[in-house]
Amino acid sequence: MSQAATIVRSTPASRIAGLIALAVLAGIAAAPLWASSADLRLITEILFYLALASMWNLLAGYAGLISVGQHAYVGLGGYLMFSCVLFLGMNPLWSIPVAGLAGAALSVPVAWLVFRLKGPYFAIGTWVVAEVFRLSAAQMASVGGGSGLSIPVSVMRDLGSKDQRETLIYLTAFVLCVGAIALVYLLLRSRVGLALTAIRDNEIASSSLGVRIGRIKLFVYVAAASVTTMIGTLIFITKLRISPDAAFSVNDWTVFVIFIVVIGGIGTIEGPILGTLLYFLLREFLADLGAIYLMILGALAIVIMLAAPKGLWGLVVQRFDFSIFPVGYRVRRK
Amino acid sequence: MALLDLQDLQKSYGALAVTQNFSLTVEAGDLVGILGPNGAGKTTLFNQITGTVRPDHGAVWFDGENVTQLDASRRCQRGIARSFQVPHPFVGMTVYENILVGATFGRSTFDPRKLALDVMDKTGMGAKANKLAGSLTLLDRKRLEMARALAADPKLLLLDEIAGGLTDSECISLLDTIRDVHAAGVTIIWIEHVVHALMSVAKRLVVVDFGRKVTEGDPAEVMASPEVKSIYMGEDAHG
C-alpha cells in the first residue's frame, strides 16, 4: 500500500498572507473612524468596483461566460431600489436583498435566452439584453422615463444624519464587497470550483468526466447576476439620482470592470483586487487629462494583454507560485 | 442482457457518412479491440457511445437503458468513461486535481479525495501528484487520461489509441494496467493501431472501415480473414 497521504489546501505563505489580509480588512472596515468624508466616498466606490470585478471574473474567468452586458443588472438594481422606495415606501437599504432575489429570478429567463449563443455571439447577446433593459426603463413613465428621477430628500433623511448615512452606506458596501469575494473564494474551494476550473481548461474532457457544464454555468450566471444587482442597488443609493443612460452605462459598469479584471489577472481571485487598486490609482492621477486618460487606459490594457495575458497577478504567480486565496489541492506524503 | 448495445447507428457530416448501419453488442466483462485504418470512423463511434456526438439515427443502450439522448456527463455518471486519442488534460490543474475531477463527478459515491489518491497510486502517477498536467510528457498525459477515466468508476471504459507513440517497455506497463483494470471487472473497448498490443489482451476484435463494421470475432481469426488483409495489406481479398 502507498504511504499515507494527506490533502492540504493551503501553504504556510498563504496562511500568513491570509492573516495579513484579515488585518488589512479590519483596517478598511474601520475606515469611518479614520477617513475623511471624501476618502470614505472614494473607498466606497473602490469597493463597488472590486465587487463588480470579482463577479465578472467569476463569470468570464472561471465559467468562460464572456458577458459584456452585466450593466443590465447594475441598472436593474438601481431601478428596483427606486421602485421599492417610491412605490412600496421601503427603506432603501432593505431594497438590497429584494434586488438580489429579483436579479436572480430575472437572470434565469435571460440565461435561457443567451445560453443558446456561444463565444462572441454570447457576448453580443448579453449586450443586446442590456440594451433592451435600458430601453424598457426609458419607456416607463412611472420611473421618470428617459430623463430619470431623484430620491426624495426625506427618504435619505430617514437614514440618519449625513455622517451616519455615509457610514451606514460604507459599511453596507464593505459587507457586500467582502461577501462577493468570499462567495467567489468559497465557491472555488467547493466542488463547483473544481468543476469550473476543469471547464475553464477543457469543456469536452470535463463533460466526459461527469461535470454537468450547463448546470454549473447557469448557477454561476445566476449568482453573479444576483450579486451584481445588489451592488447596483447600493451604487444608486449613493448617487441619489437615476436615469436609463446612467443606470445601464456599458462604459461605467462593464468596460471599466473588464479593464480591471484583464489588467489585474483574469481567472484568479487576487487579479480583480490588484486591478481595482491600479485602476483607481490611474484614475486619481490621470483623470484630469480627459480623453487622453482614456487613451492611456486603452493602451495599457493592450500592452498588458500582449505582454502578460494573465494580467499582473499572473506575473506574480508565474514568478513566485504564490496565492493569497489557495483553491487547489496538494498531496503531502508523511 | 448486454452492457452496451449499439443499434444501427448512423452519422454523417454533410455528404460524408462517418458511421453507417453500425450495430454492436458488448457483454459485461468483455475486452473488445477495434481496428481500422485512419479515418474509418472509430473515434466518431466512441463519441457516439460517450455522448460527445449524437447519432443521426439509431440507438445507444447502456446497462438496460436507452442513453441516446443523454449528454456525455450523464452517461459518465451511469458508468461510461473514456480516454481521448489526443490527451485533453486540464493543463492548469495538478495531476491529483485532474483525477479528482473524475472521482468527484463520475459514478462513484465513495469519498472523492481518497478515491483519487487510490487511483493515482494504482496508475503510477503518485510521484507526480502536485505537478501541473500541462507540464507532463506524452506518456504521462496518456496515463493521466486513463487515471482520470478510472477515477470516474466506469463499468465501461473506452480507450482511444492509448498505446500510440509509446516505447515497448512503456507499452508493457500499460498492458499490465489494462489487464488489472479488466480483472477488476471493468468492461473495456480499445481502439488501437498497435496491433500486437491489442492482440495480447483483446478477447474479441471488431474491424471498422468507411464507418461500417467489416468483421468481428476471435482476434486470431479476424486478423487472418481476407477482409482484414485487404484493408491492411492492400491485398486483393479474393486473390
Image: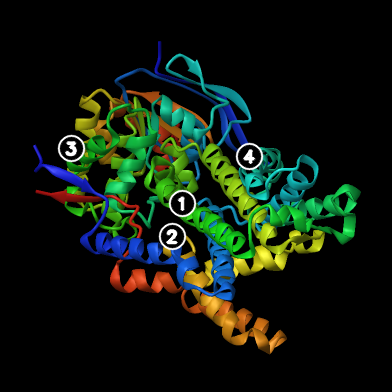
**A16 on left or right of A45:** left
**Which dot marks residue A184?**
1
Residue B37 at least partly seen = no
> Percent position (x, y) of residue A220?
54, 45
Q: Mark 3 or 2, which is nearer the eye? A: 2
Residue sitting at x 43%, y 61%: A268
Label 4 secondary element? helix
**A114 on left or right of B120:** right
Q: Residues within 10 Å of mark 4 (few under 14, many from 20)?
A: some
Q: CA distance from mark 1 to mark 2?
A: 7 Å
* Residue annotated with mark 2: A269
Q: Do the residues at pointers 2 and 4 share their chain?
A: yes
* Residue annotated with mark 4: A101
Between A230 and A248, the one nearer to me in the picture: A230
> Percent position (x, y) of residue B227?
43, 32
The chain under label 3 reads B
Residue sitting at x 54%, y 27%: B70
Note whether A91 is above or below A55 in the view shown. Answer: above
2 or 4: tag closer to the N-terminus: 4
Q: CA distance from mark 4 to mark 1?
A: 18 Å
> Percent position (x, y) of residue A78?
72, 53
**Which dot marks residue B176?**
3
Residue sitting at x 30%, y 56%: B138
Task: Look at the image and name its color scheme.
Answer: rainbow
Q: Mark 3 or 1, which is nearer the eye? A: 1
